[in-house]
Image (cartoon, rainbow, N blue to C red):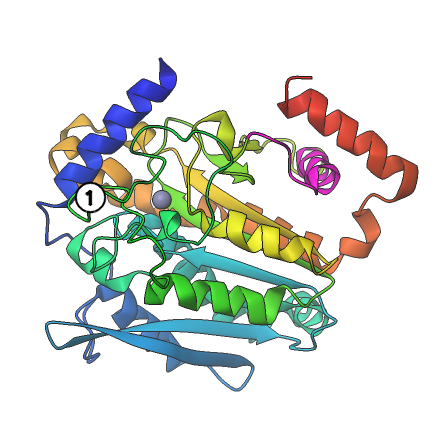
Amino acid sequence: MWSRFFMIHRLIQSCLGLLVTRYPSPYSSSTSSSPLPEIQFLEQLFSLCDQRIRVRELATVYHKHDPFPIYSIHMGNPDPKTPKIAFIGGVHGLERIGSQIVIAYLETLINRLEWDALLHHELENLELILLPVINPVGMYHGWRANGNGVDLMRNAPVDAEGKVSFMVGGHRLGPWLPWYRGRKNEDMQQETQILVDTITEYLLPSPFSMVLDCHSGFGMEDRIWFPYAGTSRPPENLAEIYALKQMFAASYPNQNYIIEPQTHHYTTHGDIWDYLYKNAQRSGNTFLPFTLELGSWRWVRKNPWQIKSLIGLFNPVMPHRLQRALRRHNVLLEFLLRATMSFDNWLPRGKQRLQFHHAGLDCWYDR
Ligand SMILES: [Zn+2]
């Protein structure tokens, strides 16, 4: 019942996405040649950066001669032996709030670098990588998919183990339908490839790394999903994920994120994090990818009229709610940064790892 309701919700959202080309922006315009406000604001922030922040233009996607650069921002210690953490936004172009959270966090960090000795200490001991706008053309149009109509989060070369949720699980019928995976045996889309390459180059060689990929659009609660998306079996790092969950709950007892496997809700082909997570198993390093799914229905419930605009289905529209969304997740981002730097202090080992694995099975899986 729940999953059917969810699928209808997604279908309506995605179909509406095909109709919308313009949306309001919280950012002022700038001299950037890119028409996307998020990129304009990012480039304004880059003008404030010094050599402690390494900005890379990974590619520029063009649409009707307009440039849409895809940037990565690196801060901290690039030594492959240091732990790494990446914050990702804008994989689904409709879900702008994910990008805005990552960009707001970058703005905070740029300013804290001026005075915050604790931040300096963190950055000596880890590397932080931000990919705030992976799908800029989709974001410009207000599409979930990229400019070719491909859903990047169904586009990785990995098939689900068993049946997937109808349509929402990914299909190859064509780009006119939402959740299109792209053609069989075709290369990954440029945006997917950039994300995969960046994580593979910088995170997977590290002994410990984490990702938080920021999305929105599901239910009333803020959820943090972990692999797998393509199978209901538990991930190899269930013990580590359970340890992190317990540590977060104990350290920040008033937080109310729901942490769970994605397959509690639906199963998909082509999930980028499944693909990278499976690759990471061969390295022997610990790689924990999480997806933040902000509960956008809550914003609609408080302000029902915003359902008439597409942006309102996925994003906070009222300025005070946008402001709240941009500040409330800082606790989570800070926690993940500290947990990454301190991974040696909490990763379960030996007998405790086995205990945590069984506790994770009891918590999330039928046995
Ligand atoms: Zn999404």
**Overall secondary structure of the magenta section:** helix
Left or right for 13, reference 57: left
Left or right for 247, reference 24: right
Left or right for 249, reference 199: right
Q: Looking at the image, which residue sits at the far front?
A: 185
Q: Is residue 301 visible?
A: no
Residue pictured at 21% horizontal, 53% vertical: 149
Of residues 64 and 39, the one drawn nearer to the viewer in this rendering: 64
Instruction: Point out the stretch of residues depicted in magenta.
Output: 232-249
Residue pictured at 56% horizontal, 74% vertical: 75
Left or right for 316, reference 46: left
Q: Quadrant where the C terminus lies?
A: top right
Q: Residue 13's image quarter?
A: top left
Of residues 91 and 115, the one drawn nearer to the viewer in this rendering: 91
Q: Quadrant where the N terminus lies?
A: top left
What's under tag 1, amino acid-wise? Ile
**Is residue 56 magenta-colored?**
no
Percent position (x, y) of residue 324? 39, 43
**Is residue 241 magenta-colored?**
yes
Percent position (x, y) of residue 268? 42, 37
Quarter holding ligand 1 = top left
Query: Mark 1 Cα within 10 Å, few/some/many (few <14, many 20+)?
Result: many
What residue is disc 1 on?
311
Number of numbered discs on residues? 1
Q: Looking at the image, which residue sits at the far right?
A: 351
Percent position (x, y) of residue 90? 34, 55
Residue pictured at 56% horizontal, 40% vertical: 227
